[in-house]
Amino acid sequence: MVDMGKIRIGDRVIWLGSAKSLSYGNRRVPAQVVKIKEERIQIKIQTPAGEILKYVSANSLDYSQS
């Protein structure tokens, strides 16, 4: 889980949520923070087919190792 007070736009994170919409089925999806709202974070996920923008809660994100 990421801390809402420490997360910044452009940070690389790992999305831990369900990946039903992603064709390759990965459950630890690398993403980049695009927008931060009160309780939701918009992330950008790069897939083989293109980019996906998704709003998620901070509970479903983890810090990237890189």
Image (cartoon, rainbow, N blue to C red):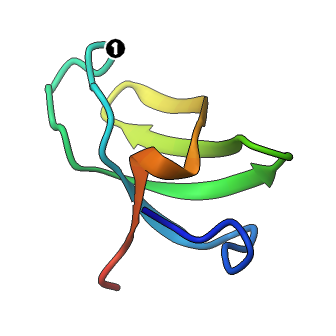
Left or right, 43 with respect to 37, comes to left
Helix, strand or loop at mark 1 = loop
Q: Residue at x 75, y 43 (%)?
A: 39
Q: Position of residue 26 (x, y in %)?
A: 15, 36
Front one among 42 and 37: 37
Quadrant of the rendering where the N terminus is positioned: bottom left
Left or right, 18 with respect to 64, comes to left
Q: Residue at x 72, y 53 (%)?
A: 34
- In the image, residue 30 above or below residue 18: below
Q: Residue at x 26, y 14 (%)?
A: 20
Front one among 9 and 41: 41
Residue position for label 1: 21
**Furthest residue in direction bottom, as rendered:** 66
Q: Position of residue 6 (x, y in %)?
A: 68, 80
Front one among 50 and 41: 41
Total number of numbered discs in the rendering: 1
Quadrant of the rendering where the C terminus is positioned: bottom left
Q: Amino acid at mark 1?
A: Ser
- In the image, residue 16 above or below residue 51: below
Could you say which quadrant of the image residue 32 lies in?
bottom right
Q: Residues within 10 Å of mark 1 (few under 14, many from 20)?
A: few
Q: Residue at x 47, y 42 (%)?
A: 45
- In the image, residue 7 above or below residue 48: below
Q: Position of residue 14 (x, y in %)?
A: 36, 58
